[in-house]
Amino acid sequence: MVRPFLRSLFLLPLRQRLIYLALVLARMLVSLFDVAGLMAVGLLGSMLASGLTDKRSATFAGFTVSIESSQTFLLITLLIAAFFLTKSFLSIFLLRVTSLFLARVEGRVAQSVAEHIFSGGLSRVQSYSRGDIHFAVMGSSQSATNGLLLTGSTILTDFALFLSVLVVFVLVDASTALVIALYFLAIVLLFQLLISNRLRKLGVRQKETSIGSTDAIYDLSQAFREVTVLAKNAFFIQKFSHFRTHQARNTALQKFYFGIPRFLLETGLMIGVIALIGWQFLRGNLSDGLVTTGIFLAGGLRITGALVPVQTALANMRIDGPQARVAQDILTTMKNDAGAQGGFRTSQGEQPSATTTQSSGGFSVSVRDVSFTHHDAEEPTLVGINVDIPAGGYVAFVGPSGAGKTTLADIILGIHLPASGDVLVGGLRPEVMREMNPGAISYVPQSPGLVSGTLAQNIALGIDPSDIDDEQVWRAVHMAELDGLVAGLRDGVHSSLGKQS
């Protein structure tokens, strides 16, 4: 259970890790206000008990105060309120800062996961289903950051509160404090032992049902025409319904398990109060029993308030652990790759080599000893391919289906990365050429990929809508001989192609 949390923690960059630990430490230190507040409660209880026996002073934990003036009671009461109010305000502030910090971390982690998936060539993308990708950048990234790290901070903070309250109990009655500590810890451990394995399995099922339902909807959306013509809509809807129903059931079970700790701890607190009252009155006098019971009531409420979130957080951690593993594995791979290469590899700084061949007719292409195997294939698709294409030349790849024509074209484009060998376009690797000379490599696919938005946004692919030059868009339309068609659209090049294009 702790391992997924520690893994997420140590995958953070050092600066983010230090900020996180500083915020957790600050939240733990705020628990000292609870200690001061409970000490004040104990002192007030001692004053009230002393008043019952006509004493003129009261002593608690080494502090002695006069009880002859009602102003003393008012002062102690105000101090109690001040301590607990200050603690509440600081806790709320630090929780907000921690939550917003982890939200920024989650955004960066999701970006890193997406960059890894889409920067390793087409083979890496094809190794994931649409549901896998959606889950990795959304659900798993959230579980690895806000899920585990925020949960971990809650456990550490509220456990510090538990220990702080226990210190006050020790000052009042060490033997009673030991019994109380063991009593509440037994409740926590019993709950964890009963449901921990169920929660872990629930986390695995949540991951599987999330991916399955997403895949079903994406498949139906992408192949809607074919599925509708074949009257197979019901099959995909049923497939989606199966996963989505189980996902809803898992979510309901998760909420059910999260609600159990409150009832257990509240019941445990009431049973403990009754038992403590009986015990104190059997072994002491009325005034001692009143002070101890008062402290237990106030401290028990604080312990219950701390252990309910701890129990819920522990349950969350068991559920988030399996779901966080996808993002954690990707981040670990990126970290290992960066360490092996002395930093993240980038093509931005690479300069053209002396072998760069460029003419007004374009760039030369050189393919040397290229081999490639698809991620799900046992046999290689290409073995030892050598091709030279002069600048301005034309070459056709001809062969039967499955011979590797498209794969070779994808390798020249830099969409696939060869397992061995080299590909140079104008003396540079294709991915470097794309970075240094955007648009120098063009591609006309059999089935063009479209993005949500307008015709202009699809023509000027990847350019911010505010930076699109309409004249250049119309020039492209004219070159494609689509002037008449586009001019007939209500909004011309700014006509929407639909949400799913």
Image: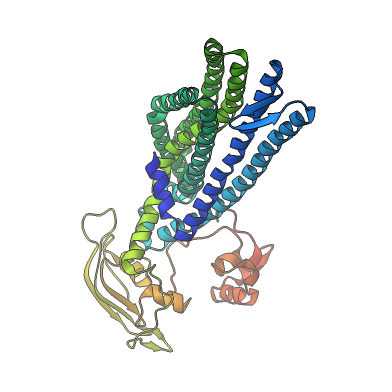
Q: The C terminus lies in which quarter of the figure?
A: bottom right
Q: Can residue 6 be seen in this snapshot?
A: yes
The foreground one among 362 and 25 is 25
To which quarter of the image does residue 303 belong? top right
Residue 31 on image: x %, y %: 57, 40
Residue 32 on image: x %, y %: 58, 40
Q: Farthest residue in the front direction? A: 56
Q: Can residue 234 be seen in this snapshot?
A: no
Q: Please state if 205 lies on the left or on the right of 379 as rendered.
A: right
Q: The N terminus lies in which quarter of the figure?
A: top left
The foreground one among 27 and 438 is 27
Image vertical order of residue 356 relative to residue 382, above or below: below
Residue 284 on image: x %, y %: 55, 14
Measuring 33% from the left and 68% from the top, which residue is drawn there?
341
Residue 240 on image: x %, y %: 47, 37
The type of colouring in the image is rainbow
Measuring 33% from the left and 60% from the top, which residue is drawn there?
336
Measuring 45% from the left and 47% from the top, which residue is drawn there?
144
To which quarter of the image does residue 479 belong? bottom right
Measuring 67% from the left and 38% from the top, which residue is drawn there?
83
Image vertical order of residue 458 relative to residue 81, above or below: below
Image vertical order of residue 410 relative to residue 29, above or below: below
The foreground one among 376 and 17 is 17
